[in-house]
Image: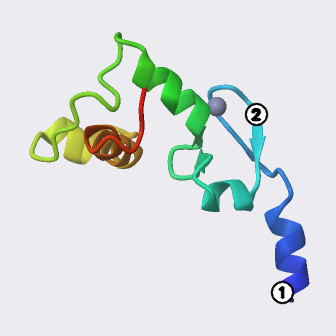
Amino acid sequence: MKGSFSLLSSKKLLECVECTRRFSLRDIADGFYWPIAGVCMNCYLFLAKNSRYCFAKQFDPDHVDCSKFCPDRGVCGVLSARIERGILEI
Ligand SMILES: [Zn+2]
């Protein structure tokens, strides 16, 4: 069964809703695709670089928009923390 999982994990079964590129289970494990939102890391980095969007710039866990309503709150919080700590550069 271990072999069939690794075969499945390398198949590009998941599509990014923004750019329509396809990703595998392995890509999820490597952080290239966020299955909760169905969006890939390339598209999230585009949002992070674009000043028109608050994404990865003003994450506030105490604000109701950030903590409850934003569909990208999970990845936004992770990327905001990485940028703040200097782990990720935009
Ligand atoms: Zn994408």
The residue carrying mark 1 has its beta carbon less than 8 Å from ligand 1:
no
According to the picture, the residue beneath numbered tag 2 turns out to be 21
- Which element is circle 2 on? loop
* Residue occupying the point 72% across, 61% down: 26
- Image quadrant for the C terminus? top left
Q: Where is residue 80 in the image (x, y as percent from the top left)?
A: 30, 39
* Residue occupying the point 34% across, 45% down: 82
According to the picture, the residue beneath numbered tag 1 turns out to be 2
Q: Quadrant of residue 20?
A: top right
Q: Position of residue 88 (x, y in %)?
A: 42, 39
**For residue 51, which numbered disc appears in the image?**
none
Disc 2 marks a residue whose amino acid type is Arg
* Residue occupying the point 33% across, 43% down: 73
Q: Position of residue 77 (x, y in %)?
A: 30, 45
Q: In this view, does 2 lie above or below 81?
A: below
| Residue neighbourhood size for the residue with mark 1, other residues' Cα within 10 Å, grouped as few (<14), some (14–19), many (≥20) | few
21 or 86: nearer the viewer: 86
31 or 52: nearer the viewer: 31
Farthest residue, direction left: 62
Farthest residue, direction top: 52
- Which element is circle 1 on? helix
Q: In this view, does 31 lie above or below 71?
A: below
Disc 1 marks a residue whose amino acid type is Lys
Along the horizontal axis of the image, is 39 left or right of 51? right
Q: Which badge, 1 or 2, is on the more N-terminal residue?
A: 1
The residue carrying mark 2 has its beta carbon less than 8 Å from ligand 1:
yes
Ligand 1 is found in which quarter of the picture? top right
Along the horizontal axis of the image, is 57 left or right of 22? left
- Image quadrant for the N terminus? bottom right
* Residue occupying the point 63% across, 56% down: 28
| Residue neighbourhood size for the residue with mark 2, other residues' Cα within 10 Å, grouped as few (<14), some (14–19), many (≥20) | few
Question: What is the spatial separation of the Cα atoms under label 1 and label 2, in whole angstroms?
Answer: 27 Å
